[in-house]
Image (spheres, coloured by chain):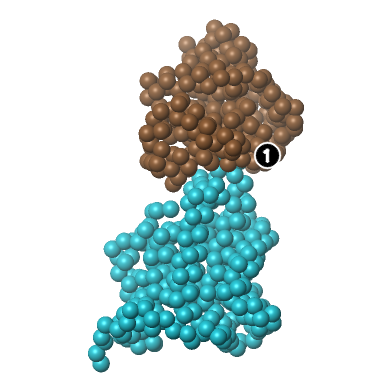
Chain colours: A brown, B cyan
Amino acid sequence: MLEVRGLRAGYGQIEVLRGIDLDVRGGEVVAVLGSNGVGKSTLNNNISGIYRPFGGAIRFDGTDITGARPPSIVARGLIQVPEGRRIFPNLSVRENLELGSYLRARASRAKNIEHVFAIFPRLQERIGQLAGTLSGGEQQMLAIGRGLMAEPRLLILDEPSLGLSPILVEEMFKLIARIAAEGLAILLVEQNVVQSLAIADRAYVIEKGVIALSGKAADLLNDPTLKASYLGL
Amino acid sequence: MIYDFPIIFSSVMNGLMLGGIYALVALGLTLIYGVLHIINFAHGSLLMIAMFAVWLLLETLGIDPYVALPLMVAGMFGLGYVLYKGVVGPMSHGEDANILLVTLGVAVILDNLALYLFTGDTRIIERPYSFEMVEIGPALITLPKLISFLGSLAVCLVLWLLIDRTDLGKAIRAVAKERQGARLVGIDVENIFALTYAIGVACLGAAACLLLPTFYVSPQVGNVFVIIAFTIVVLGGMGSFLGALVGGLIIGVTEALGGLFLGEALGQIGISLIFILILLFRPTGLFGGAK
Ligand SMILES: Nc1ncnc2c1ncn2[C@@H]1O[C@H](COP(=O)(O)OP(=O)(O)OP(=O)(O)O)[C@@H](O)[C@H]1O
Ligand SMILES: [Mg+2]
């Protein structure tokens, strides 16, 4: 479904990613791991068209989307829930969700809002509240809800558990597993390695701009190099 | 001299009528500021261009200003869109300081173009309804002033509905505060900038049609309004919609009462006084911090 080949990307003169190969197949949950500043969000934003890659190719459903603009990428159903939420603070919860279907799934907007509320009842209670006044956890729910409103075919989640309390982190992973069970393909970027690997089918570890390790999530969970270099175990 | 109630009342009425137009001009300015974070220095010149267009439509084609309103709104919208896409956007390179200078440049060009085309003369139009009077309580208001007031309110209402209710309006508000998030839901941010600029300029098309039956037009006429509109934008709270409307009405009334009590020449002092007073107690403006 998503094929990334030899992707090189960065900012100005600085090359952060130096040849990334990565695949997500239909219905799969794929985890991307790596230490802070290694370029995970850079990868996501190049896939989403926020930045233009230096080189390499990105294909989605067989179509080349390398360097395409975000509207055309969103229109294909490749949706990112970004790090830091990026919800619209001056809009109500309802309006935030509505804008999730700005380009896609417009006709089923009402139905999908109900769907999001079924997943996040907390959001329904705060439907008229300005998004900027939500708690951090609620904002994260809203960000994911907004992403789901587009009826994504592939959902990129960038650190969805960031800034959440341990209980909420657990809930968040359960929830991601639940969304995945509906058949949605997910590219999951996370710091919580063990929990991510527990719900992922496969995983990639980025180090120094390239994929240092990849494989089945279950295998990686027991991989000594991963434990040593990344988990510090 | 005794100022009895009817005189003051009719002065307040006249102030409100003018305030409606002020609000309309300020509305476009505050919308553009709220979303693009720039002060559109070309605003006054664009109003002047719109007023000359209304004047030309009447003089050459005999189209009444009120009939020309939809045409002018559409025309100014188009001009604003093209101006942003062709000049303001590309030349600003994403830097706000540049956009500011570019809009200032546009203003200089438009002003001189008008001087060249129309000379510095002041022109007025005359319509059959120009001096018709309407009685409101103890006050007599000319019909065009009343129409301009009601028309301004109507345009404000339409604009508010557009911004509050439609997807385009939501997208505009989203872009104002969270551009990256907007891109990720598929909003074409650059296009929203152009549309916002165009909507702000389209307000001037409406303002010109409502204004001309009671006002003059000359290449400098924009200055009369734009300085007051800047005052209103700051007074109402930068980027605040309601602030522009309420601020416009307050300034209109202040100007009229100032003129009544202090004389035409000193009337504008009242505006400065109100301005300073309000900002003293509310440094962010009347509705600052709101959308
Ligand atoms: N807009 C930018 N301009 C310049 N450099 C940037 C920009 N965004 C990120 N970087 C740099 O690129 C590198 C990779 O950043 P990125 O955000 O992709 O890391 P990350 O793997 O997502 O980290 P984290 O786990 O902390 O979120 C970092 O060194 C960062 O400083
Ligand atoms: Mg990151």
| Chain letter behind tag 1 | A
* Residue B90 appears in the picture as rendered: yes
Residue drawn at the location 75% of the way across and 27% of the way down? A62
Residue drawn at the location 52% of the way across and 83% of the way down? B129
User: Mark 1: which secondary structure?
Assistant: helix
Front one among B117 and A124 = A124
Front one among B186 and B4 = B4
Residue drawn at the location 66% of the way across and 20% of the way down? A26
Front one among A206 and B80 = B80
Q: Position of residue B15 (x, y in %)?
A: 39, 77
Q: Quarter of the image for the N terminus of chain A: give it.
A: top right
Crowd rating for badge 1 (residues with CA inside 10 Å; few <14, some 14–19, many 20+): some
**Label 1 sits on what residue type?**
Ser
Q: Position of residue A208 (x, y in %)?
A: 61, 25
* Residue B49 appears in the picture as rendered: no
- In the picture of the structure, the residue carrying the numbered disc 1 is A72
Residue drawn at the location 60% of the way across and 61% of the way down? B198
Q: Is residue A181 above or below residue B230?
A: above
Q: Position of residue A217 (x, y in %)?
A: 58, 12
Quadrant of the image occupied by residue B82: bottom right
